[in-house]
């Protein structure tokens, strides 16, 4: 348990969970549990997923926004396939 908790801390602050992935446009739908803004760097990690990306754009209901808060359901462009329940961490 302690090792898993330490790994969580090294990943940064958890800011959301992937709810779905749209492969044709390479967009992840993410339910936020924290704040996210354009320019942030995030790490998406799951059972078979693990990569970092810079947030170049965020959309809510197909409208571009500069930032989003906990509770928002957002779409972000990703460079790799993500899966439901993958965790999204803010990289410091």
Image (cartoon, rainbow, N blue to C red):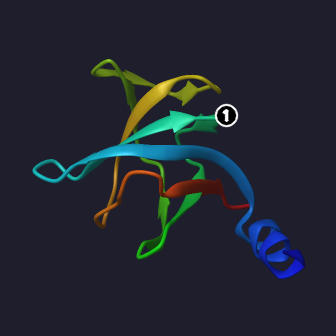
Pick the front one: 20 or 64: 20
Left or right: 3 as drawn, with respect to 85: right
Q: Position of residue 53 (x, y in %)?
A: 47, 62
Q: Disc 1 marks which residue?
A: 35
Q: How crowded is mark 1: few (under 14 residues within 10 Å), some or many (20 or more)?
A: some
Image: 43 above or below 73: below
Q: Where is residue 87 in the image (x, y as percent from the top left)?
A: 55, 56
Q: Is mark 1 on a helix, strand or loop?
A: loop
In the image, farthest residue toward the bottom: 3
In the image, farthest residue toward the left: 24
Q: Position of residue 39 (x, y in %)?
A: 55, 47
Q: Quadrant of residue 91?
A: bottom right
Image: 73 above or below 84: above
Rendered-image quadrant of the C terminus: bottom right
Pick the front one: 33 or 85: 85
Q: Where is residue 84 in the image (x, y as percent from the top left)?
A: 38, 51
Q: Residue at x 84, y 74 (%)?
A: 1
Image: 13 above or below 1: above
Q: Quadrant of residue 75?
A: top left
Left or right: 19 as drawn, with respect to 87: left
Q: Which residue is drawn at 71% across and 68% down?
A: 11
């Amino acid at each position: 348990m302690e090792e898993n908790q330490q790994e969580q801390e090294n990943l940064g602050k958890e800011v959301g969970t992937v709810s779905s992935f749209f492969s044709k446009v390479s967009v992840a739908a993410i339910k936020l549990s924290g704040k996210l803004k354009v320019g942030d760097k995030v790490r998406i990690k799951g059972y078979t997923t693990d990569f970092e990306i810079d947030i170049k754009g965020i959309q809510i209901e197909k409208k571009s926004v500069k930032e989003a808060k906990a509770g928002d359901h957002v779409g972000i462009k990703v460079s790799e396939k993500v899966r439901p329940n993958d965790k999204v961490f803010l990289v410091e």
